[in-house]
Image: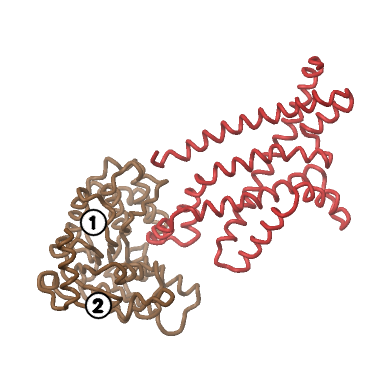
Chain colours: A red, B brown
Amino acid sequence: MDFDLFWSSLGPLLLGAVQGTIPLTLASFALGLVIALVIAIMRISPNKLANAVGRVYISLIRGTPLLVQLFVIFYGLPAVGVKIDPWPSAIIAFSLNVGGYAAEIIRAAILSVPRGQWEAGHMIGMSRNQALLRIILPQAARVSVPPLSNTFISLVKDTSLASLILVTELFRVAQQVAAFSQEFMLLYLEAALIYWVICLVLSTAQTSVEKRLDRYVAH
Amino acid sequence: MSPTDMSPAGPVLQVRGLSKSFGSNQVLRGIDLEVPRGKVVALIGPSGSGKTTILRSLNGLETPDAGTVTVGARDAAPASQPGAEKPLIVDFGGVAPSKKELAKQLSALRDRSAMVFQQYNLFPHKTVLENVIEGPVQVQKRPRAEVVAEAESLLTRVGMLEKKDAHPFELSGGQQQRVGIVRALALRPQLLLFDEPTSSLDPELVDDVLIVIKELAEEGWTMVIVTHELAFARQTADEVVFMDGGVVVERGPASQVLRNPKEERTQAFVRRLLHEI
């Protein structure tokens, strides 16, 4: 292996991570969580229409490949006159995708909070929305951190698909350097290593978030 | 705080013909109940007799199929409870109200009563003090400083002030239930509802909670208590109502119903419970 190339390509690859992979992940996850929360609340709503819309959304997102979703938005929509740039296309596709998966996680977390908590909220005079916001969701948040972290970590790696719609991120930089130098093994392993390090850092962050949220629970 | 701001006239609670079914299981069959101001009514009876369903209906946690619930007027309505100077009448029978209208009625019931749960149901993500002030501050929109001062004095009364910054998981069951009682009191309800408040407690912790409830009774709070503690009911309740199969089998002064019950079913129940203890 060519270690000089390893070191000289590390800079551009890291730049690809910092300017591409990481912001793409953060923006998509943040937006995805908002979508997920809305869909989850629709799914537990007594309103049948809202419930059905939420169910169909989740089914579509989970039942189709992320790559297909990405291509429909970037390559497909221009056919009906909607042309979106690579970056926003990627963020839209990833956040819609996260929204579908995380909605089920949040819904399950909400349902895991004992009914007595809703009742205590109502007892002190809260409306359904107040109880949801102030009593149920904070408790659901604690339960949903581990599975949401999984979604987050998957997303870091899924963002490599954005290279296929011309977004310059870690994997696309690796591809470019590899094509130029013909050192495919080295560059792809190097990219893998960087993804792995990012995920290690995230796992550590997950542990500390869990600890923080666990502070009011018996051990 | 004492409930002296309530008008001295008329019953606080009047229930007429309350009925409720869960599927084919009719748990309440036309219950009548009256609780005069400042009095304590104990509901006793075997499991599944409908006692808890009555309490939950009074707090708007269940919607009865028929019957009326009337909560008496308040002398001076607190600013947080406009309209409380008039009696509240909720009629569950007749034309089914819209969902919105029903929610409004149930919420009006909750504004006037407060419940202490068997499983405490404290909010685990909030401290003791936060549990107590949540309703008055967030729902009743009373000034935080005033509510905190009142909450601290209530916590002092039940010996829980030094735990005000603790989370529920750090407390024993008895301590949690005392906080549950304070949380109910802080809402300044006209009517206090206790749903088997000591049934989840270790035996040695029961007395701490019962003493608090007894003191509240002596102070003149109007209360409905579902309990299996017959000795406590005899000492605290003005009236004991024995229920079985969704109907009131017998009612009367505590000493009479518990010492010399007239009905056979009451006799059997009291005998069985005394033997168990």
Label 2 sits on a secondary structure element that is strand
User: Split into 4 quadrants, where in the image is the N terminus of chain B?
Assistant: bottom left
How packed is label 1: few (under 14 Cα within 10 Å), some, or many (20 or more)? few
- Vertical placement of residue A202 versus B69, above or below: above
Q: Residue at x 69, y 44 (%)?
A: A28
How packed is label 2: few (under 14 Cα within 10 Å), some, or many (20 or more)? many
Label 1 sits on a secondary structure element that is loop
User: Split into 4 quadrants, where in the image is the C terminus of chain B?
Assistant: bottom left
Residue B248's label in the rendered image is 2
Residue topped by disc 1: B1
Give residue B83's position: percent from left, percent from top.
36, 71
Rendered image quadrant of residue A217: top left
Give the residue at the far top of this rendering.
Answer: A4
- Vertical placement of residue B103 versus B208, above or below: below
Give residue A71's position: percent from left, percent from top.
82, 48
- Vertical placement of residue B12 versus A30, above or below: below
Badge 1 vs badge 2, beta-carbon distance below 8 Å: no
Of circles 1 and 2, the one toward us is 2
- Vertical placement of residue A46 versus A38, above or below: below
Judging from the image, mark 1 belongs to the subunit labelled B
Give residue A61's position: percent from left, percent from top.
71, 54
Kind of residue sitting beneath label 2: Val
Residue A214's label in the rendered image is none
Q: Residue at x 83, y 31 (%)?
A: A175
Give residue A143's position: percent from left, percent from top.
51, 46
Judging from the image, mark 2 belongs to the subunit labelled B
In the image, taking residue A209 as reference, residue A31 lies left or right, namely right
Rendered image quadrant of residue B256: bottom left
Kind of residue sitting beneath label 1: Met
Q: Compare marks 1 and 2 and give the one earlier in the sequence.
A: 1
Q: Are discs 1 and 2 both within one chain? A: yes
